[in-house]
Amino acid sequence: MNKISMLLVVIVAASVLSACKSGAPGGGATTDTSAQSSASGSGDLATRGTAETSQKADEPQIDYMRRDIDVNIKDGNDALQKKDYDRAEKIFLVALNQCDLYIGQEARQAAILNNLAAIYEEKEMYLQAVPLLTKAQKLFIRAFGRKSQAVYITLGNLGRVLAKQHRWEEAANVYQTAVGLMEEDAKVVKSESYREMLDKCGEAWEKAGNAFKANKINAKIKALKAPAK
């Protein structure tokens, strides 16, 4: 997964757990076992079939809706990092439904939407990812304020997804917004992530055919490379 997406997983997990601990629903996991009959056959095949049936019967069927939201988010993040995208999507969708049952869940909702978008990006389902990222950045603003790191990282993710669709002008405008937010923090301007955002913004403006704005971004990049006097 893209580095900036993985960074967001860490940032969001910490932010959500610290900022939204109250109001989360609790619950426990339930299990459901089902017996399966194995086909008869030779000794080895029958033994193996019986063992496999027993193993499947022992596997727990988790009722994710009855679990704590943060537990689901953590498990979803774990599945996402392991590239088990189908499982991660399933868990995140349940967690999103859980958030709808409680007020003040903007940070959790934004985290889940961002990670669902990461799944759809990996599956090249870009049209599905765009509205999720658009909504996620707005929710992050409501939860943490417009200067939050999660906001401009989400915008960076949105710009990347738009660029993958060759929607260059849209991508450039999104990157430009992210650059502007980053420039409001003197420490962030010195970071590698700021330089990377400038590079992506400049490239998008060039491919959008806007040489004027591309040159302005390239001038900022050149200034960063200039030795301090």
Image: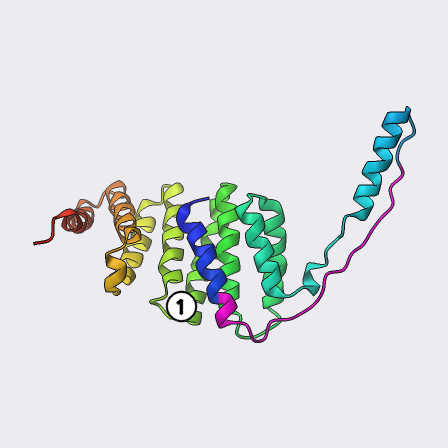
| Quarter holding residue 91 | bottom right
Range covered by the magenta-colored residues:
16-37
Residue at the top extreme, as displayed: 42
Report the magenta stretch's main SS.
loop
Q: Is residue 178 above or below residue 21?
A: above
Does residue 194 appear to the left or right of 101 in the view shown? left
Q: Residue 33 versus residue 102: which sits nearer the camera?
A: 33
Does residue 199 appear to the left or right of 24 in the view shown? left
The residue drawn where x is 56% and y is 75% is: 22
The image quadrant where one finds the C terminus is: bottom left
SS assignment at label 1: helix
Q: Is residue 21 magenta?
A: yes
| Quarter holding residue 71 | bottom right
Q: Is residue 106 visible?
A: no
**Residue identifier under label 1:** 141
Q: Residue 47 versus residue 98: which sits nearer the camera?
A: 47
Residue 209 image position (x, y, % from top left): 23, 42
The residue drawn where x is 61% and y is 65% is: 69
The residue drawn where x is 38% and y is 70% is: 145
Does residue 98 appear to the left or right of 199 in the view shown? right
The residue drawn where x is 59% and y is 44% is: 84
Q: Is residue 43 visible?
A: yes
Q: Is residue 80 magenta?
A: no
Residue at the left extreme, as displayed: 229
Does residue 10 appear to the left or right of 207 in the view shown? right
- Which amino acid type corresponds to the residue marked 1 in the rendered image? Ile
Q: Is residue 163 above or below residue 19?
A: above
Q: Is residue 108 above or below residue 157?
A: below
